[in-house]
Amino acid sequence: MRTKILQLLRERPSQPVSGQELADKLGITRTAVWKHIQNLKKMGYVIEAHTKKGYIFVSAPDKLLPEEIGQHLHTRFVGRHICYQDTVTSTNEVLKKLAYTGAEDGTLCVAEEQTGGKGRLSRGWFSPYGKGLWFSVLLKPSFLPQEAPKMTLLAAVAVVRAIRECCGVEAMIKWPNDVLLDGRKMVGILTEMSAEFGHINYLVVGIGINVCVPREMVPENLRDSAVSIADVAGHPIDRAALLGRVLDCMEEYYGTALREGFAPIFDKWREYSTTLGRMVKVISPDKTYIGTAVDIDPEGALLVRREDGSIERVLAGDVSIRPAHGTGKYQ
C-alpha cells in the first residue's frame, strides 16, 4: 500500500493530492492513508501535508528501499520479493538462510552496508554504508550443477550493460568476472551453490558495485586498484535506478541461458572483455607463464596461447591473471 501511495503522489509532482482522493483510489479510509503517510515519513520520505489541500511528495531517502527499487524494475520475477537490510555481515549469507526456509525464486537481498562481504577466492570486499550496491539474488535454475560457474560471467555481462546504459561509462570485464573502469576494479561477483547429484537446489549470486565510495574512504592498500562509478562518470548515480537495471538485465540473460544455453551470453562477454587479445601472465599454484588470451571456451575457461603456440585452458578460481607488462593496472 505504501508503494501505491508513493506512486500516486509521484504522478503529480509539486501538486497536492487529497487524503480523500488517495483513500478512494486505494479503497481504504483516510485514517489509513494518514497512517501510511506517517510510516513513509519515518522511513525518510519527505511528504508535506497542506491543510484542506492534501499531500505533496517532496523527496525520497537515498536508500535502497523496496519502494524505491520497485519503481525502476521491469522484471517478471527477479527482485519481486525483496529482503531489505540496513546492515548485514553478508547479503549472500542472509539469502542462503532464506533459501533454506523456502524463499521464492528471484528473491533479492539488498543492504546499505556489509561488514563481512567477500569475493572470489575468499577475498574481502569493502562495502561501506550507502556508497554502493551490495546485493544478492536467489535463483533456482533447471540446468545442471556443472553449468553454475557460468552464472558469474552472465552476472558480469548484466552489470556491465546496466552500468553503460545508466551511467554512461565504458565498463569492461577482466576474466572471468571482474568489472573494471579505467583499468581499476569496481565490481565483485560471487556465486554460491547448493546442489545434489545432477540437481541445483539454488544459486545465490552476490554482487558488490562501488557506486560512489570516496577515494579517502577506501582502505589504503586498495586505493590504487579500486574505483567508483561516480569517480569516472563525474555526476551523481541513482543507486536504485542502477540496481533496477542490473536486475532487468540479469533476468533477460538468465532467461536466454535457460532457453538457448550460455553461448549468446558468452558472445556478449567477449564484446565487453578487456582480457581477450592481450598479453597476460598466468600465475597458478604449479606454474607461471606468459601468453596471449585468445578466447573463452564453451565452459567459460580462458584459452591462452603460449609463446610456443600451444593453447592452455585456464579455469576460473585457480589462477591469477596479470598483464604481461607494466605495473599491474589494466589499461
Image (cartoon, grey):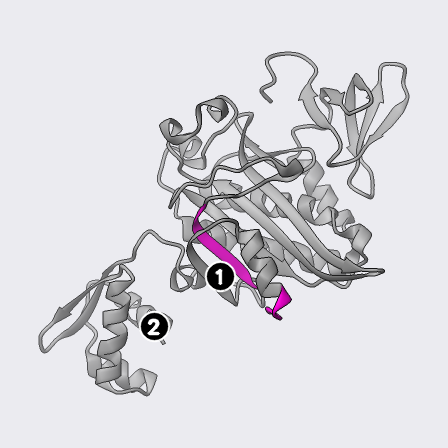
Q: Is residue 95 magenta?
A: no
Q: Which badge, 1 or 2, comes first in the chain's sequence?
A: 2
- With 250 as the anchor, is 232 left or right in this view? left
Residue 8 sits in quarter: bottom left
Residue drawn at the location 46% of the way across and 41% of the way down: 127
Residue drawn at the location 63% of the way across and 38% of the way down: 122
- With 281 as the anchor, is 8 left or right in this view? left
From the image, which quarter does the N terminus lie in? bottom left
Amino acid of disc 1: Leu
Q: Position of residue 287 (x, y in %)?
A: 82, 20
Amino acid of disc 2: Arg
Residue 138 sits in quarter: bottom right
Identify the mark at residue 183; answer none if there is no mark: none
- With 19 as the anchor, is 298 left or right in this view? right
Q: In this view of the protein, can residue 153 be seen by the observer?
A: yes
- With 64 as the anchor, is 293 left or right in this view? right
Q: Position of residue 143 (x, y in %)?
A: 79, 59
* Residue numbers of the magenta segment: 100-114
- Mark 2 neighbour density, 10 Å: few (under 14) some (14–19) many (20 or more): few
Residue 202 sits in quarter: bottom right
Q: Residue furthest top?
A: 326
Element carrying mark 2: helix
Which of 329/129 is in front? 129
Classify 245 as above or below 10: above
Q: Are marks 1 and 2 in contact (CB under 8 Å)?
A: no
Label 2 sits on residue: 2
Q: Position of residue 47 (x, y in %)?
A: 21, 64
Element carrying mark 1: loop
Q: Position of residue 220 (x, y in %)?
A: 44, 23
Label 1 sits on residue: 73
